[in-house]
Each structure stands twice: as structure tokens, then as C-alpha cells.
Amino acid sequence: MNRFLITWVFFLPLGVFAQDVGVGSPAEPGVSAQPSVIQRVEIVARQGSTELRRAASFAKQIYGREELDRYGDTNALDVMRRLPGVNVDSGGPRMRGLGSGYTQILINGDPAPPGFNLDQLSPSQIERIEVIKAATAEQSSQAVAGSINVILKETSRRSLSSLRLGLASGKDRPLGNVNYSISESVGPFNMSLPISLFEWNREIRNSVDRKMAGSDGQAAISEQLGKINSWGWGYNLAPRFNYKVSDEQTIALATFFQKGYWNNRTDYTNRAVLGNPIFDDNAIQDGYWENRRGNLTWINRFSEDQRIEIKAGVQQSRSAFDLRNLRAGATQLQTAGNNQDDAITQAGKYSQLLGSAHTLTAGWDLENRERLERRTTTNGAGIALLPSFEGQAFEAQMRRQAYYIQDEWEISPQWQLNLGLRNERIASESKNAALPVSNVSSVLSPLAHVTYKFDPKSRDMVRASLTRSYKAAGLNALLARPIVNSAYANTNQTNTYLAPDRIGNPTLSPELATGLDIAYENYLNNDGIFSVGVFHRNLTNVVRNLTELRNVPWAAAPRWITQPQNFSDATTSGLEFELRGRASDLMPQLMGNAKALNLRSSLSFYRSSIAALPGPNNRLDGQQPWSANLGFDQRISGLPLSVGGNLSITPGYDTRQSAEQYFKRSTTKGIDLFAMMPLSPTMSLRAAASAGVQQFGPPNGSTQTLLSNGDYILTDRYAKPQLNITLDMRL
């Protein structure tokens, strides 16, 4: 009865869809799993996402091909915004309502390189997505909120090929995307080659209202109506090669290439309501990005009890841009720059089976990363804005050394234990026009995960984790290169609090977090699940962008400067619910015959508090008070047709960012609908629509930055619904 009441609250709004339900379709096969620990008996059977989740020794959610294909998404970011406990904004996916940098993004278990764009990665290249709630010793503990691990498709021992053709709505015409994948096997050699081509052309409209000091230093009020056009194209390649040297040895090469070209044009219509306001200039901007990555892995199984894995990798990310600020058709400022991130990684681990279900693993993880930035800003006459800084190379280097040991032990059919200890040493150095700044930090992370299963079939279990994790500043935040606000480019005058210059901080220390996670999971029939979890984090050295009036070497007058600084300690906690399954299993009293109707829902509540700021609303940046997802999919009786939808809601909230500054965000909603029709055993057609969420752009809604003196910037954004049509073929 309790389960019925919980389900009724979650899914009553969808009950109307259960009246015309046919016979359920057979479950789709899951993906093959490679156990992360040594096992005496090789498991040949294919495991689905639910089985992999249930068998894990720590809390994680796994989403396979069914979830990835359901809405015919053209990029991975659109998939993630429907996952429980995951929110997506302009900074990428975020877990547990925490801001940018608290969620670790992994590609095949390794940290994603800087500049990696999930919104440019096709779901057709992904095998599954793992949402990991707490840090583990085997992976970097730079995961305060958790980790999202994107597993790319592996090679196959069979010759396979598939083709996906897609059309998406654009500003002036339909936009095409193509995804092709081929796998071949010749003797001991296996290879796969997924290729994706994509383009976009979208229009976003916004309005910007301001109340702040104008060009004469007096109060001014202004209104701007903006039209932002964004267009471009790109491609992804992810070749993978496997060579079976012997029954004991395997060599694998995994590579990834991504490149794209983008263009933005912003045009404003301006209106002065009071005084002499300063308006944002029109702008034309273009550029490119590219990512290259290669990892070579050698695996040797000495015996059924011993295994060693050694990896070496190289990464390179590059980008360049050219921005022109226009006023009355004439160039006011022109900024051109380029960035480059290079990294070399080397890692390894040795695993020893100590018993039938007891594995000890020890390993290391080494990384050397460098970032180089150049930027030049000139006025309309070609004169450098900051002669002491323009065109100079700003460099930052980070060296990370990590060593860990992990004990994964199934003590009994009921108890499972995962204990680990990881030590990471991070040395960073910033080089620029000023003196070099070096910083060394060391983080010792004890990590413990316990699972208790109430029954032998593992249908009910409790998981608990006690972890220590951290958040390190990105190399771009360490670069002490000033960026002058374009609206106040005259450095002989003081700018405003709401239009500050920006500068990095090479002395930033990592944020440290001690966390507790407890979750109950109930596995239902037909891959259904109900889970409820709580978490808490104590954080120290929290970084926040602070704005101060300073005398700076690049300006004759005092300037308002925004800079990241270690600001305060903080706490955050939350409550998370997830419920999914067949309607007939979840609500048998109401929907006993609804075997073809599948329901999904999640509901999360969050709170946080920064010690150095008085309340109320002294929450961490970007953390909403709650979020919810509600979805369904159904096979229509008597027709070769499946339909479904998803509704996501994030409420509006206020954030106190400092004693003088507040941030307000309005409620955002996203609606997704899809219909899928099989045309043949090897071909299917899918149509999807989304509203309230903009591909390659911000969501609908408004944001406001408000000062205690009454000055503010209010921005409203409007985006058109997105339509997608995809044709899937197995060749």
C-alpha cells in the first residue's frame, strides 16, 4: 500500500494515457558489461542497465541505448537534461544543483579534456552514461557533486554498420546531421569507426533592462531588445582499435577527434528611459574549436587471479576567435585570441583476487597539463587597449600525481564493501607579465562505500558512502590576464559594479569537501526501480567571484574588478527520489492492464549555506531549491507506433552572492515529445519536439543581478521550439 501511495503521487497526472494500451513490447537487450574487478567465472550473458546498477559496489545510475535513443536527440547534452538529479545550463551538466566545476565529466573513465563539448557529441557514439553519486578511489576525487561517465561505443567482434540521418528545425531551413558507424573484425584485430557530422543555425531573442550609472556617472535606465543568430558546423570521429595478442594480453587504442566552426551575430534595438545610459554594442564573432585525444591501453591477465592495466594518453584542445564590437556600423573594439591546452597522461592499476569475491586494486594516475592564451584588443583605430598585456602569452601549468588503493569485497550475499584511499598532489604555476606564481596542494581522500542487501535476489538494498573530494580551479581561472569590460573600454574612467573588468587568480586553493550519502533502492519487476537518497557535504575554501573597486596597473582611474577568490566555508544537503517502471507494476489497482505504458519520474530537493554570508538565500552559486522530471513512453495498441514525453521543471530562486549583490532566476520548464515507428526490422523513423529548452543556447526564462543600492540588470530570453526527425538504419 505504501508503494501504491508513493506511485500515485508521482504519476497520477499521466493516468489518462493508460486507457488505450496494447500488449507490451519485449524488453530491448542491454549492453554488454566488462566487470571492473577480477572474477573467477567469466560472465557471458548480456546485462542491462538495471542489472549493472544493481551489481555495482557503490551508488550509480546507468542509462543505456534505450534512454539514449528514446527522443532522437542530436547531442548528448539534451539526453542528460532528462536524467534524474542532473541539470543542464550554459556551463554544461551539473549534479545536485551545484554550480560549474563540482561535477566531474569523464570520457571512458578519464577526465574530459578542456573545451570538450558534450553538446556536439552525438548520442549514437555513446554506449551508455553512468551517473556516479560519490567519488571512488579508482577515479579522480575531483567530484564534489559526483561524476558523469560517458562510455563511448566499443569495438565489436562482428561486422556491423549503422546509419542515422536527421533533420532539425533551423532559423531559415532544416538542418542536417549524419551519424555513421562501422565495426569490423579480422582474426585477433577489431576496429570501429563512428563518424558524426552536424550543423546548427538558431535565433534567440532577448531583452536587457538596466538601471545603473550612465556615461556621465549619473543614474540611468535603459532597455535593449536583442536578436542573437548562431550558426556553424562540425564533426566527431572516434576510431577504436583492439588487438588480442594472446588469451592473456590485449592492446587497445581509443582516439577521439572533434572540430567545429561557429559564428554569432548580435543586433540590439536601444531605448534610453532615463539619463545617458551605456548600451551593449552590436557584435559579430566567429571562431573554431578542436579536440584531439588518444589513449593506448595494455591489459595483461597473468592468471585468473591477477591483472594489470597500463594506459598512456595525449590530449590537445585548441580554439580561436575574432570578436568585433560595432556601433553605428563602425568597429569600436576588436578582440582576437587563441587558446591551447596540451596534456600528457599516464595511469595504471594492478588487481589481485584474494578470494571468490574479494579484489584488491592499487594504481596510479599522472597528468601534466599546460594552457597557453593570447589575446589582443584594439580600438577602431587599431591602437592596443592595454599595451602592457595585449598579445602577450599567458601560461599556466598543472601537474597532478595520484596514487590509490582500493579493496572491493563481497563479504556475504548481503554485505558488499568498497574501501579506498587516494592521494592527489596538484602543483600549478602561472606565468604572465607579472612574476610567476606557484601553488602546491595535496588532497588525501579516504573513501568508503557499503551496500546491504535485504534479500538474496538484491531487490532491496541500502547504500552508504563516506567520502572526501575536492574541486580544483581550472587553468583558465589561474591566468592573471585582465579583460576590460567593452562597455567601459576607456580605462581613464571608472566602470560600474555591474560592468566590471575581469582577472584570474593564480593563488587559488582547491575546495575540499567531506560528504555522506545514504540511499535506499527497491528493484521492481520489468526493470522498474524506486530509490530515495540523502546527501550532505561540508566544504572549505569555497571559491566565489568577488567584485571590488581597486587601483590597477592597466587603468588610470580605479576600476571595479571581478576575481575568483577562496571565500568561505559552506554546507549543502539534499533529498533525491527516483521512480520508474511499467504502469501495471507501479499502480496495479489503477492500471492493471497498462503493460505497454512505462513511467519515469524524479524529484530532488536541495539546500546550501555559505558561512561568510548572512541569510536568507546565501546558497551556493547556481543551486536551485528543487527540480523535477516526469516522463512516459507507450506502445499504441494495434499500431507499430510508440509515443512518449517528458516534462522538466526548475523553480525560480534567489541567491545572495555578496553583501551588496543578489542574483535572481525565474522558473524554467522543458517539454519533450517523441513518436517512433518501425519501418522494417532494420529501419525506424522517429520524430521529436522540444520547447522551453534551446539547443546550442540558453533556456527560456529570465535572470536578474540586483545590487543593494537598487541598480540591476534584468535579462529575458526567448527561444523557439525545436523539431527533430531521424531515420535509423542497420546496414
Image (cartoon, rainbow, N blue to C red):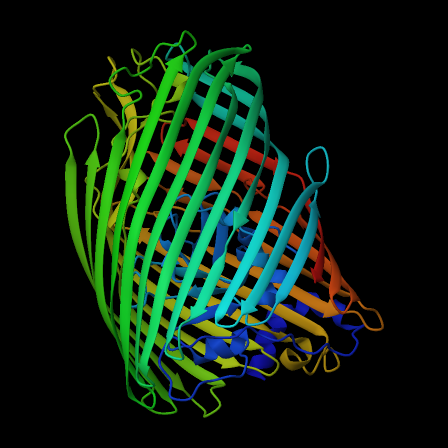
**Count of numbered marks:** 0
Residue 500 in which image quadrant: top left
Q: Is residue 356 above or below residue 388?
A: below
Q: Quadrant of the N terminus?
A: bottom right
Residue furthest top in the image = 381
Q: Look at the image and tell me in which quarter the C terminus lies.
A: bottom right
Q: Nearer the viewer, residue 610 or 280?
A: 280
Q: Position of residue 359 (x, y in %)?
A: 30, 82
Picture layout, residue 17 above or below residue 144:
below
| Residue found 44% across the figure and 53% down from its top | 94
Residue found at the very far right of the displayed protein: 638
Image side of residue 436 versus residue 134, left or right: left
Q: Identify the residue at horizontal 47%, vertical 48% (top origin).
A: 257
Left or right of residue 454: residue 298: left
Residue 5, located in which quarter of the rendered image? bottom right
- Asked if residue 619 shows in the view, the reply is no
Viewer-proximal residue among 15 and 372? 372
Q: Residue at x 21, y 19 (%)?
A: 553
- Foreground of the two, 205 or 316: 316
The answer to which image quadrant residue 298 occupies is bottom left
Q: Which residue: 55% across, 30% down?
A: 263
Spot occupied by residue 518 in the image (x, y as percentages of width and height): 37, 73
Where residue 136 appears, as percent x and y from the top left, is: 31, 68
